[in-house]
Amino acid sequence: MKQRKQYIINKKFQLKTTFSVIAIVFVVVAIIIAAIGVNAAANNKRLIHIIQIQDNIVEALIAYSQSPHDTDQKLAIQNIANDHVNNINTIKKIIELNNILLIIIIAFVILQGIILYFVLIRKTHKIAGPIYVMSNYFNDIIKGNIPNPRPLRKNDELQDFYELFVKMVDAIRSRQEGK
């Protein structure tokens, strides 16, 4: 049996089914991404606010350390300033990683949509193929020709329905031959 290469046989059915499933998946994922995005944006905003507050505190400490005090106090303030810079850099990296994570999630969702498209087209092909074959046989019967149905492919859907269809064609053929 010749293997068919055309996967879209019934364009309306296959694309409607495929895009309906993809749309449902994308809506659910969009809601999840929106929730994550809103949360990440709010957290990023809070982190930026914390950075501003911490900058103000450290600037005040540095200004305070410029006045004549003992060296231990100046050293302690300098250590606080160094820790502050390290913490700010860590917070900025967290913000950057949050943004990168959102971009990666969106990229995976797009990739998932593309993969889902091809999987669903192949799956609907296993339904549309038998319907296409039977539709052609129906047209033959309408024109007065009794078809000789071939077996469906092993992985096609609607096998039971097709067997019933073949029995119907055989019954029509028997009646025609009996006349």
Image (cartoon, helix red, strand yellow):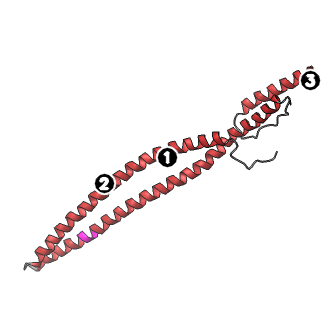
Q: Is residue 60 above or below residue 162?
A: below
Sequence-wise first label, 1 or 3: 1
* Relative horizontal placement of residue 106, taking residue 114 as reference (left or right): left
Left or right of 59, for residue 146: right
Where disc 2 sits, the SS reads helix
Numbered circle sitting on residue 26: 1
Question: Is residue 89 within the magenta segment?
Answer: no
Classify 36 as above or below 161. below
Amino acid type at circle 2 is Ala
Q: Secondary structure at mark 1?
A: helix
Q: Position of residue 96 (x, y in %)?
A: 37, 64
Left or right, 3 with reference to 28: right
The image shows residue 137, relative to residue 45, as above or below, that is above
Q: Quadrant of the C terminus?
A: top right
Spatial CA span between label 1 and label 3: 55 Å
Question: Residue 168's quadrant in the figure?
Answer: top right
The amino acid beneath tag 3 is Glu
Quarter placement of the N terminus? top right
Name the outermost residue toward the top: 179
Q: Which residue is mark 3?
A: 177
Q: Residue furthest front?
A: 143
61 vs 4: above or below: below
* Tag 2 residue: 42
Magenta span of residues: 83-87
- Judge the density around disc 2: few (<14), some (14-19), many (≥20) Cα neighbours within 10 Å: few
> Which residue is at 73% across, 38% downward?
132
Q: Amino acid at mark 1?
A: Phe
- Give the CA distance from mark 3 to mark 2: 79 Å
x and y percentages locating residue 154 in the rendered image: 75, 40
Choose the circle earlier in sequence order: 2 or 1. Answer: 1
